[in-house]
Image (cartoon, rainbow, N blue to C red):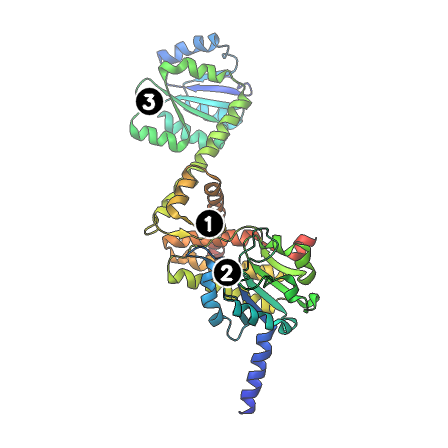
């Protein structure tokens, strides 16, 4: 192994560990579910950008995720793609038939120093989860959405469009220090995609633009809520 | 030219028997004080410009064309002035279309008593009704625009939007919009904001 390769591997390893992505397609009951779709693309999209954990329905996956707990304190930013639970207090997870312990409780992250953690909750009405005391304690700095995130996924190009948005959000989370800055960056991502779509002029792009508009409008950061 | 009492009704027509008989009818409905009758379109526009006119009633088939005159009134006063054309004959489809586009109400002469009764209601109420109608018209245009765009989507009857509250087809969304159900209203609002952002992007590009 050459020195250059070692250096690169070390740099890559450090860089990857700064950001994590957790995708929980569990609870996806719809054929065109956005979280389900992203779970297929994220492992590829996260390469060189963030450590990616897709939490599938199988119990083994939960155990793997649980075993990563020690690594959690190395993550400066965490981006979650998930659904809310029925009470909007946690992310929707399925504990599986043989386990009774919730898999993704706030405690999972409790080893992380709160001041260094930034969470993006790409979750419908995710701000309701993030403003509960249990989550605020662990992730005081976050960006999420006030409203639901609708998506129109009828073709592969639609999947790739949203996958591109997801990747850009992960990158934005990795380089942002403040929630307000992160929110502005995410807003800019939607705005740029919106501008791209406006030049294509396909009928379904109007629907994507409406969904990007809704996402932009409902973005909220922790500093706005605490103010 | 008589001075406009604020606010006022303004009737415009070529010199005619109708115009001559109108004065008596206005008196009968106690509207003479609050109304001005003129046969000069230029006077009409001058009075509207000076303010205080709540309603303009023009004859559809007057020499200068009632709808063209009311188009000028609209340009000058926007939605604040109620515009009405009166006619003895059935308007042509083109006239109807034009009147609708301008937000001009068409009244047949046999319904003149109803019109005069309407003019008896306070001008502030009439102005409020007028604004409401203008908003409804605008709202309808937004709806038509959005529905037309959605109908352009290939196989829109089968195309699903995934949502936290359950998936729905574009076809269902169109129904929600037409029936003004909560989801439809939400998307109409979203469409208006989307157009606003599109305009912003175009303005940035052109500058």
For marks 1 and 2, give the CA distance: 15 Å
The image shows residue B188 at horizontal and vertical percentages of 46, 43
The image shows residue B3 at horizontal and vertical percentages of 53, 18
The quarter of the displayed image where residue A179 is located: bottom right
Q: Residues within 10 Å of mark 1 (few under 14, many from 20)?
A: few
At 46% from the left edge and 61% from the top edge, which residue is drawn? A36
Provide the chain ID for the residue under circle 1: B
> Visible in this render: residue A54?
no
Q: Residues within 10 Å of mark 2 (few under 14, many from 20)?
A: many
Provide the chain ID for the residue under circle 2: A
The image shows residue A121 at horizontal and vertical percentages of 58, 60
Label 3 belongs to which residue? Answer: B61
Specify whether disc 3 shares its chain with disc 2: no
Tags 3 and 2 in contact by the CB under 8 Å rule? no
SS for dot 1:
loop
Classify B7 as above or below A109.
above
Label 2 belongs to which residue? Answer: A26
**On the picture, is B85 further left or further right than A109?**
left
The image shows residue A75 at horizontal and vertical percentages of 62, 71
Specify whether disc 1 shares its chain with disc 3: yes
Provide the chain ID for the residue under circle 3: B
Question: Given this view, does label 3 or label 2 mark the residue nearer the observer?
Answer: 2
Label 1 belongs to which residue? Answer: B166
> Visible in this render: residue A133?
yes
SS for dot 2:
loop
SS for dot 3:
loop
Question: Given this view, does label 1 or label 3 mark the residue nearer the observer?
Answer: 1
Classify A36 as above or below B2.
below
Mark 1 or mark 3: whose residue is earlier in sequence: 3
At 56% from the left edge and 79% from the top edge, which residue is drawn? A12
């Amino acid at each position: 192994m050459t020195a250059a390769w070692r250096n690169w591997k070390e740099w890559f390893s450090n860089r990857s560990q700064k950001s994590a992505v957790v995708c929980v397609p569990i609870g996806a009951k719809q054929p065109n579910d956005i979280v389900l779709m992203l779970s297929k693309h994220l492992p590829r999209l996260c390469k060189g950008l963030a450590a990616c954990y897709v939490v599938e329905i199988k119990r083994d996956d939960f155990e793997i995720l649980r075993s990563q707990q020690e690594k959690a304190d190395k993550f400066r930013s965490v981006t979650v793609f998930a659904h809310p639970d029925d009470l909007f207090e946690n992310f929707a997870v399925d504990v599986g038939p043989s386990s009774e312990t919730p898999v993704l409780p706030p405690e999972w992250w409790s080893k992380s120093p709160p001041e260094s953690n930034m969470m993006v909750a790409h979750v419908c009405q995710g701000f309701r989860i993030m403003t509960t005391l249990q989550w605020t304690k662990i992730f005081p700095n976050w960006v999420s959405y006030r409203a639901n995130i609708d998506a129109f996924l009828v073709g592969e190009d639609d999947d790739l469009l949203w996958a591109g948005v997801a990747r850009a959000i992960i990158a934005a989370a990795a380089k942002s220090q403040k929630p307000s800055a992160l929110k502005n960056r995410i807003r800019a991502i939607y705005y740029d995609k919106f501008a791209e779509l406006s030049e294509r002029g396909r009928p379904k792009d109007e629907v994507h633009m409406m969904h990007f508009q809704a996402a932009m409008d409902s973005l909220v950061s922790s500093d706005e809520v605490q103010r | 030219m008589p001075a406009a009492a604020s606010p006022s009704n303004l009737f415009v027509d070529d010199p005619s028997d109708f115009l001559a008989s109108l004065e008596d009818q206005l008196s009968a409905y106690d509207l003479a004080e609050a109304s001005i009758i003129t046969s000069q379109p230029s006077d009409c526009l001058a009075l509207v410009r000076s303010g205080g006119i709540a309603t303009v009633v023009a004859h559809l088939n007057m020499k200068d064309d009632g709808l063209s005159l009311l188009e000028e009134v609209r340009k000058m006063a926007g939605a604040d002035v109620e515009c009405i054309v009166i006619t003895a004959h059935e308007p042509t489809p083109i006239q109807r279309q034009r009147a609708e586009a301008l937000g001009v109400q068409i009244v047949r002469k046999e319904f003149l008593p109803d019109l005069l009764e309407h003019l008896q209601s306070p001008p502030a109420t009439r102005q409020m009704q007028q604004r409401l109608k203008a908003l409804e018209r605008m709202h309808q245009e937004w709806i038509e625009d959005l529905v037309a765009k959605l109908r352009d989507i290939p196989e829109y009857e089968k195309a699903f939007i995934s949502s936290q509250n359950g998936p729905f087809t574009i076809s269902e969304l169109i129904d929600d919009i037409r029936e003004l159900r909560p989801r439809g209203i939400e998307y109409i609002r979203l469409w208006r904001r989307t157009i606003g952002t599109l305009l912003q992007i175009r303005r940035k590009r052109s500058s």
